[in-house]
Amino acid sequence: MFSRATAFVHDLVVQIVILFVEHIVFVMALDNYHMRNSIIYHAGIAQGLYLIVVFLTVFGYYTFYELYSNGQTPGKKAHGLRVVTLNGQKIRLFGSLLRNFLRIADFMPFLFMAGVFSVLITDRHQRIGDLFAGTVVIRTEDGRVK
Amino acid sequence: MTLPQSDTADQRFAASLLNLESGEPPRRRQAMAFLEQLGGLRAFQVAASLTGDSDQVVAAAARRICGESVKKGLILRGQQQAQPLAQTFAITNFYQLLDEVVFILRRNLSGVVIDSFLFSIPKFAMVTLIFLCFYFSFLVELFRSPWGVCPLLFFYELLWRPLVWNSTGVAFLSGFPENSMRRQAVRVSRTAAYWDMVWDGLLEGMLYASVLSALYCWYLGVVLSLWPAAMLFVVWLMVWVGSSCTAATRIMLRNPDAKVIWRSGYIGNFWLALKLGAVLACLYLVVVGSSLSLFWMLGFADVLDWPGLFFFGFLIAADALIDPFVIGFRILLARLNMEPGSL
């Protein structure tokens, strides 16, 4: 539970850095290409695109790494954790999307209390997203934090 | 066509398995010849499944391999007595240590929950009284006087707290995978152990209750400065760091005179204790924040505007929930720092 929480904080820091870079790029693009006076800006298209990028960064981050990095986000890799399906197979797109969208349910009512409770009482230490997606977080033999 | 001869025995063994699966008699016979030449447990395991093969040459070779292997004293894996899997895991960092506490708690979750609930009744009673201040004004008067709350703090820390250690600690010990610890859980619940714990924790408990009382007096405005609380805190910390025998070790020692490598309750693990403090701060934030959010969701939109006393109520409730984890952590840490023979 605590390794998962630490891995989450690790990933959160990475996401904040990415979001920060994206924000700088967005502001620079607006200013350098004089987009603030353009129709794209006034119609809200640029802001909408920016929000889509933010959304993809926040939710797509986990799905991307779980699919293309063997079920391990950078945080999970650093703490020797991996997401797999209940029968030990690699997680698939639908499962990954489901478990990550349901982070909202795990967050309720505040700071993942529902997720913590779910991890405590389920046999395989699954949060709500894991229960719905049929996935489980396992400990790998490598990737120890010194 | 046969597979090319490989350089290493492993590769040749793998190639012979492919040959055996091919279904072509010449390839299968060649593979058996290689296995006969190779010998050992791997060849024995493969040959054992081929003694009844339809190809008589292959079956004969398989029987020869089995006979030679048995003469050498080899035993097939399936014939060995079933061994339970080792349930060991090396703890390599602080967070895995915390995970281990959760793992042990979960092994006797109902016992820990029931015990901690029963012995948290004074805390829950206090929380109930605080929340009843909404409806009964005389309760507000009770909490406005330090003489109402401070004696309760002393009573809890000096006399009730060892009882919590004795009960919740024993429930935690029952969840240990280690037999010796579970056996210890049966024997520590006794009156003598309770009084030992009372005497062991007397000084630390008095100082801790004094810190809390000083803080409460400051909250009430009876004491205008935080300095008394700060000074008491420093003294308490010094005693806490240097305490020579804590309830955590007391609860596990079969022989109270046994040598304990971990002399101090905390001095050898001071940084771990600080890390635990940071983690506990986060846990308190999660529990108190969740409680406030739940109240807000239930329609108490002004929950953040409630008097400060109610915040103490949330904090005490959170403390009751987190306490078993803290007790478990200290017992596990004490166990990891003790000589195995001292149990």
Image: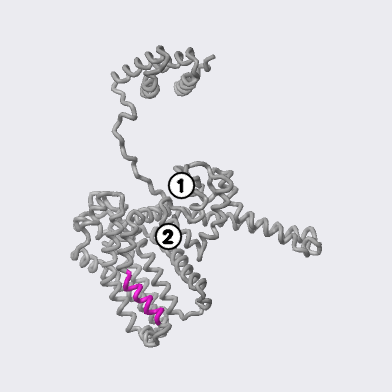
Magenta region: which residues?
A: B120-132
Apparent side of residue A46 relative to residue B70 in the rendered image (left or right) = right
Q: Quadrant of residue B52?
A: top left
Q: Amino acid at mark 1?
A: Ile
Q: Quadrant of residue B192?
A: bottom left
Q: Mark 2 falls within which chain?
A: B
| Whether label 1 touches label 2, CB < 8 Å | no
Q: Mark 1 falls within which chain?
A: A
Does residue B7 appear in the picture of this structure?
no
Apparent side of residue B53 relative to residue A109 in the rendered image (left or right) = left
* Foreground disc of the pair 1, 2: 1
**Residue B141 magenta:** no
Secondary structure mostly seen in magenta is helix
Q: Where residue A97 is drawn, which disc sits there?
A: none
- The residue that mark 2 highlights is B275
The crowd level at tag 2 (other Cα within 10 Å; few <14, some 14-19, many 20+) is some
